[in-house]
Image (cartoon, grey):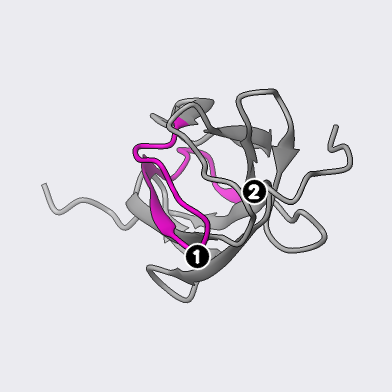
Amino acid sequence: TITQRSNCLKAEVTKTNRSWNTSTVQQRQFLVKQWTVLNIGECPWTTDFTIVHWNGTLFQPLPAVKNFHQPVEPGGFFIITFEFKAPEEIGQYQSRWMMRSPTGQFFGIGVSDTPLYIELNVKQAAEDDD
């Protein structure tokens, strides 16, 4: 549950590595997703802050919780990188992620605390030429 957040827990995404949040991919395709997240709050974020799987599919081999890899001062940014494989089963998948402070407060992007997300449309993999 998201509660009223402090002025310390404010973030924006400045860019992603590709223009996709929704993508059509093949089964088991290896993917890399990156977000550049800007600290627009009034307090630094330490490496005790985490990115937490919020809901949807936890793509493999992603962990459910990932610590920030560096401190982030107000006005500073960091890059979140997820490397994973598309699921085996054909279909639509969503994975949503929130940031969490060391005191357990969840926060997302913008004034509405939107989760970071990945949406995949997994299609049949091309036949191997073996």
Identity of the residue drawn at 53% across and 32% down? 49
- Residue 125 lies, in percent from the top left, at 37, 53
Check the picture and name the quadrant holding the N terminus. Answer: top right
Identity of the residue drawn at 82% across and 59% down? 112
| Circle 1 SS class | strand
- Residue 6 occupies quadrant: top right
User: Against 46, is 41 above or below?
Assistant: below
Identity of the residue drawn at 63% across and 32% down? 101
- Check disc 2 and report the residue beneath it: 94
**Membership of 101 in magenta stretch:** no
Q: Please, which residue is most extreme toward the left here?
A: 130
**Membership of 68 in magenta stretch:** yes
Amino acid type at circle 1 is Thr
Amino acid type at circle 2 is Gln
Which residues are the magenta region? 67-92
Q: Earlier in the sequence, mark 2 or mark 1?
A: 1
- Residue 110 lies, in percent from the top left, at 72, 63
- Residue 79 lies, in percent from the top left, at 38, 54
In front: label 2 or label 1: 2
In the picture, the disc for residue 24 is 1
Q: Is residue 110 left or right of residue 130?
A: right
Q: Nearer the viewer, residue 24 or 98?
A: 98
User: Against 15, is 96 above or below?
Assistant: above
| Circle 2 SS class | strand
Q: How many residues crowd around disc 1 within 10 Å: few (fewer than 14), some, or many (20 or more)?
A: some
In the picture, the disc for residue 117 is none
